[in-house]
Amino acid sequence: MSFRFQLEARDGKARAARFCTPHGEVETPVFMPVGTVATVKGMPQDTLEELGVQILLNNTYHLYLRPGVEMIRRLGGVQKFMAWDRPILTDSGGFQVFSLSDLRKVNEEGVQFRSHLDGSSHFFSPESAIAAQIGLGADIIMAFDECTEHPAEYARTKSSMEMTLRWAQRSRKYFEEHKQEVPWFVERGEQTQTLFGIVQGGMFVDLRRESAQRTVEMDFPGYAIGGLSVGEPRSMTYEMVDAAIRFLPEDKPRYLMGVGTPEEIVQYAAQGVDMMDCVLPTRAARHGLLFTSEGRITIKNARYAADETPLDPNCGCKVCARYSRAYLRHLYASNELLAQVLNTIHNLAHYLTTMRGVRQAIARGQFAHLLAQVSPPPATLLTAGHQQRRL
Amino acid sequence: MSFRFQLEARDGKARAARFCTPHGEVETPVFMPVGTVATVKGMPQDTLEELGVQILLNNTYHLYLRPGVEMIRRLGGVQKFMAWDRPILTDSGGFQVFSLSDLRKVNEEGVQFRSHLDGSSHFFSPESAIAAQIGLGADIIMAFDECTEHPAEYARTKSSMEMTLRWAQRSRKYFEEHKQEVPWFVERGEQTQTLFGIVQGGMFVDLRRESAQRTVEMDFPGYAIGGLSVGEPRSMTYEMVDAAIRFLPEDKPRYLMGVGTPEEIVQYAAQGVDMMDCVLPTRAARHGLLFTSEGRITIKNARYAADETPLDPNCGCKVCARYSRAYLRHLYASNELLAQVLNTIHNLAHYLTTMRGVRQAIARGQFAHLLAQVSPPPATLLTAGHQQRRL
């Protein structure tokens, strides 16, 4: 069976759609929580289901190092391993190799790197990164790319983009030859994974266009936009998304990697992005930064010590339905595990509710109205995004 | 309204009963999970409800230091503070003052101690410890006692026991004069808290008897047995429990403080104990030690890395229903938050299920059969108990 993407509604450039995977359907625009090592930190899987999480992101780099691809393959793939019977997407490992590992050496063949866990030496090529992703068995996997550093000169950015294009070809070739090796191939009626291409091109409009056009020529079933939210001003991110997305086909999903704040994800949906992931809601939660309909709350602040009101009076999550700010402040101030658990539930609820609202507004042709209500993100968070992966 | 304790069934010395508090009913024998600072570490309150937790223990010493008694009083009491609308019991603070604080000085008046958080100086007398417990507003509170150190000579143990008896009188007097100051007095129809006395007497049979008899003369609505599981051999614990319990009235609840392993709590129920609390299930869980119907599992062990079976095939908890040992081992080895959350759910389920089984067996007159199945605890855990509070 092939991957199916069905457009359901349009409102401006924004789209509401759905796609099918071997582990179920996903309604877009969708926010994908990050479950780095096959767990969204502190969240039991049934809590994620209650929150309405449709699809999770796992990091290939982390799972490759621990517990290892062969272990997860042997246990039936990552869905079975983590007891999550809904879709999963893995990234290519490229971004983590560039941001987390030590002593990396890049050449045409691939990347030599050292594990951030124990310093051991490893090599990722397009072929081995795809082999790892086939072994892990996520529903959607990513071509191996080079995430160009920021800032970078034009010539350097162009040559990096060219290599990513060659690596996309190699990724695709390896995938086509090996896709039946996914652990659940037989069990899921001979369905296979779906491989997305990744657009690079740094902060140059013409390179973003060229990368988009040449990646589309390879005819992937979906396209990611990578290498953004790496420290550039947010206005430049929007410009680069626009430069790429106008050359991506209407009938394929577009995935903007590693973004963003609650305000930004609405903006990206307005640009026609269908899928997003970010560690911000979960990581910020563990650091006591909470997103609400009335703005950001730093829960450790003493002003909340005797505050009997819920975190967000307009939020329907189970944290806001039950607990006071005073209690959440006490848990955080006391460095209690439950602070991290409850804060994460709320922040995920805020993101998922935001995205469901976006989808609903698009379906009703009222998205312009919703967009107008979104206040611009505060200056302190303007350079967040991929950076947030390293908070 | 006064505290009611109703015996429902007897089987040997074991009893099944129930008691009423202003925040609901409790069926005994009951195991009370420890929620030190108004949270059972990592457990959302709805998870505790799903597990069938009937009553929680909070530590007066910890809540007194943070967020402080006045804060919790102002927020309506600890049940409202932590959004837990079921019964809560607070200890007297005595045990923590002796085990956690620095530079304590004990005299007839009370105990001077330094906070383990910031070194600040504080004083607990029977009066101030009861005032703190009235302010916190737990349903059941404890007389202020001295937990005699182990080992201790006879004369020292006797004089410590005598002081605990005088402190019990002072606790009781203060409580009677101030019990209407509990934060929910009006809201709960002028109901008040219930004050239990505590039997001490170290490791001496005659002192345990004397302490029990003289505490019972003061006519408390319930009696705790304190100062056990402090490093003595388990056979001695059983002997001391027996020495005290035979002098406690049949028509009042008996609470054995700070015990025990899953096997031991069955043994104590057989001795006629109605209530128990221990940090062992929750603390051991966070350290990867899991209790199952087939024995103990140290989940970090490499032998579980590829084990697709549930933690305990005979357990009905949501962890055993969904996750494999391989996944739980991966979470623990990766130092993931979710390891602590899932392990805690399972261990609590094991304790609560064990205690429900005990109650059911007593009600059916089949407790002797159940007791015969309980294997003796392994030697390595024989001196656990109160010690476990400091794991």
Image (tube, coloured by chain):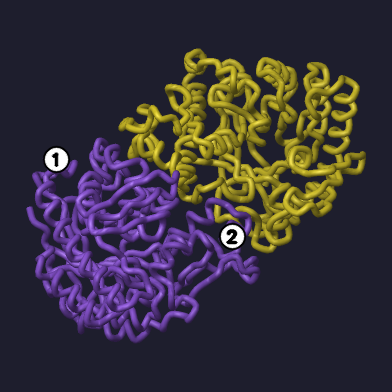
Chain colours: A purple, B yellow
The residue that mark 1 highlights is A187
The residue that mark 2 highlights is A327
Residue drawn at point x = 72 percent, y = 36 percent: B221
Q: Secondary structure at mark 1?
A: loop
Of pointers 2 and 1, the one earlier in the residue sequence: 1
Q: Position of residue B97 (x, y in %)?
A: 78, 42
**Mark number displayed over residue A245:** none
A136 or B299, which is in the foreground?
A136
Q: Is residue A268 left or right of residue B49?
A: left
Q: Position of residue A258 (x, y in %)?
A: 34, 66
Q: Is residue A82 left or right of residue A8?
A: right
Q: Position of residue A2 (x, y in %)?
A: 8, 56
Mark 1, other Cα within 10 Å: few <14 / some 14–19 / many ≥20: few
**In the current view of this chain or complex, which residue is farthest to the left?**
A1
Residue drawn at point x = 20 percent, y = 75 percent: A15
Answer with the quarter of the image where residue A149 lies: bottom left
Amino acid type at circle 2 is Tyr
Mark 2, other Cα within 10 Å: few <14 / some 14–19 / many ≥20: many
Q: Is residue B336 left or right of residue A309?
A: left
Position of the C terminus of chain B by quadrant: top right
B118 or B278, which is in the foreground?
B118
Host chain of mark 2 = A
Q: Is residue A179 left or right of residue B274?
A: left
